[in-house]
Image (spheres, rainbow, N blue to C red):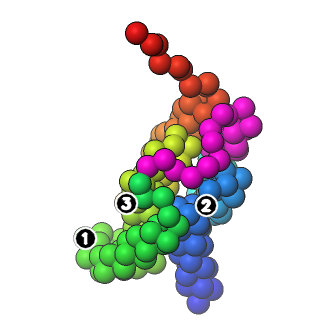
Amino acid sequence: MLLDILSWASVGLILVTSVALLISQSWQRSLLFLSLQYLGMFWLVSLHWPMTMAAVKLVTGWIAAAALGMSQPQSDQPTSKEDAWPQGRLFRLLAAGLVVLVVIASVPTVTDWLPSLHTLETLGSLLLLSMGLLHLSVTARPFRTILGLLTVLAGFETLYAAVENSIMVAAMLAVINLGLAMVGAYLLSTPPREEASE
């Protein structure tokens, strides 16, 4: 009973944080939501992996968020709205609602394909994957792109945790997360090059 309550709370936390990441314009709040998202992912992964291996996912996510946060003060990225269409929060909320409906409709099919996954784990991982892809489709800024990629990767890791519980796989996925965060931090801290005029 307690496990079910914690699993529902984790899925709720994933839903709230992924939608908040999509509509938030502040980089500080976005990194807070990313950190909380990794907390929800930690619980879903711990249903299949030992607590120590699942904690690696949590710590890796928090280190990635810290690396992105340290690169922000030196960054010249504007805090204004996106340059690309669509820009509005209302549009993003409506798109997120549509994605949630599609995810809920596809959960039984995915659970049939992967019988080792429970319904809540499938729901949480598909929410992360889908919201990350939605995030990538509506942004052009490097910081937002890295957040979307980390969200997609978190969804894949949650889904993959039910299939494989190898320590080597956990280490490789942690290295990929940290590498992605480091590349993002480098891109954010590097001043943009001015185009040469002819």
Label 3–label 2 contact, CB within 8 A: no
Give x and y (percent) for residue 127. 44, 68
Left/right placement of residue 36 relative to residue 145 reads: right
**Point 58% across, 66% down: residue:** 20
Amino acid type indicated by mark 2 = Ser
Instruction: Check disc 1: other Cα within 10 Å, few if <14, some if 14-19, many if 20+.
Output: few
Query: In the image, is residue 66 above or below residue 97?
Result: above
Q: Which residue in the structure is indicated by mark 1? A: 113
Left/right placement of residue 44 relative to residue 125 reads: right
Q: Quadrant of residue 25?
A: bottom right
Disc 3 or disc 1, which is closer to the eye? 1
**Point 46% across, 67% down: residue:** 92
Query: In the image, is residue 19 above or below residue 138?
Result: below
Instruction: Look at the numbered disc 2 and give the secondary structure of its residue.
Output: loop
Provide the residue span drawn in magenta: 64-84
Q: Which residue in the structure is indicated by mark 2? A: 24
Query: In the image, is residue 44 above or below residue 12?
Result: above
